[in-house]
Amino acid sequence: MTFRLSLSLATGAQVWARQEAGRTFKDQIFHVAVPLLGDKLEITVVEPTFGAAPLGSVVPALYVLDPTLMLDLVVGTKRLFDVFSGGSIPAAYVIGIGYADVDAASRRLRDCTPTQAELPVGLMHPHALGSGGASRFLEAINTEVVPYLEAHYPLDPKQRVFVGYSLSGLFGTYTLFRHPETFSRYLIISPSLWWDRGSIFGEEESLARSTVDLRAKVVFVVGDAEEQSERGWPNLGLPATVGRALRQVSNLRELSRRLASRNYSNLSLKTLLIPDGYHVTALPGEISLGIVETFAL
């Protein structure tokens, strides 16, 4: 994968200028070919709020997957905290890792799932590009995306924060078990642990057999109503039986229990439930609470 940057944007990229206290910021969007995926990623780089970071310092970066769904929520929440948290939430770049193609749904299914499997009956989701590409996606992030960004922006390599939701939350869980050093903190929201009949639990067992420690700070967040029907919204159209079968809450509780039972000395773990939260409606609150608790660990 080749980033053509050095402050010239790749073809198709955009620069969104904003003003804060007389200073112009550039939220940069790059379209980058990734041969490993046979696709183009869209990387969005959002600078910290002006005045929140000391000049000449390196700062954390929040790497947000599913940016179409989450980036605006994360950026808006982070700017709110920059104003009101009194420094409890550090200044940080927010970086979206998404897709240049409009069919992001097929690509996230391809890249965020660790194994090849069929979707459960009752779930309507594009499946045109297949599944099971998480290892390639993680390799691209580890060997290309993160190193380039850290070479060109003042990012602290010891303060990488992962933010993922649903299928990208599954990818974050997979990353935690396969290459936990990729990120220092993980905010994993409503992860799709049901994928391939819960194959991610096998990843956790493999990790436990291979190591005596897990060095990471992890916050899991889920809505406590996610095993119910999603308020009957027509764009979802999922019967309650599907919600129960996916076991969003039960699976996360079980995974959290297993991790806690390993007694890893360098694992900081917190699992949070949003009262009356459904898979979609809980997301803004999960992001807000999750950012606070992730930096509090």
Image: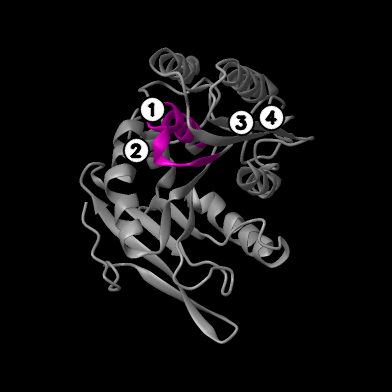
List x then y, in percent, for residue 33: 24, 54
Q: Which residue is mark 3?
A: 269
Q: Is residue 65 visible?
A: no
Disc 2 or 4, which lies upstream in sequence?
Answer: 2
Disc 3 or 2, which lies upstream in sequence?
Answer: 2
Residue segment shown in magenta: 169-186
Q: Amino acid at mark 4?
A: Glu
Looking at the image, residue 151 lies above or below residue 22: above
Considering depth in this image, is 12 or 62 the residue closer to the camera? Answer: 62
Q: Is residue 167 visible?
A: yes
Looking at the image, residue 285 lies above or below residue 153: above
Q: Quadrant of residue 296?
A: top right
Circle 1/circle 4 CB separation < 8 Å: no
Magenta-drawn stretch contains 171: yes
Q: Which residue is mark 1?
A: 178
**Closer to the eye: label 3 or 1:** 3
Which residue sits at x=54%, y=25%?
265
Considering depth in this image, is 89 or 237 the residue closer to the camera? Answer: 89
**Residue density around tag 1, few if under 14, some if 14–19, many if 20 or more, within 10 Å:** some
Disc 3 or 1, which lies upstream in sequence?
Answer: 1
As drawn, the residue found furthest toward the right would be: 275
Circle 2/circle 1 CB separation < 8 Å: yes
**Residue density around tag 2, few if under 14, some if 14–19, many if 20 or more, within 10 Å:** many
- Mark 3 to mark 2 CA distance (whole Å): 22 Å
Q: Which residue is mark 2?
A: 138
Q: Which residue is mark 4?
A: 226
SS of the residue at dot 2?
Answer: helix
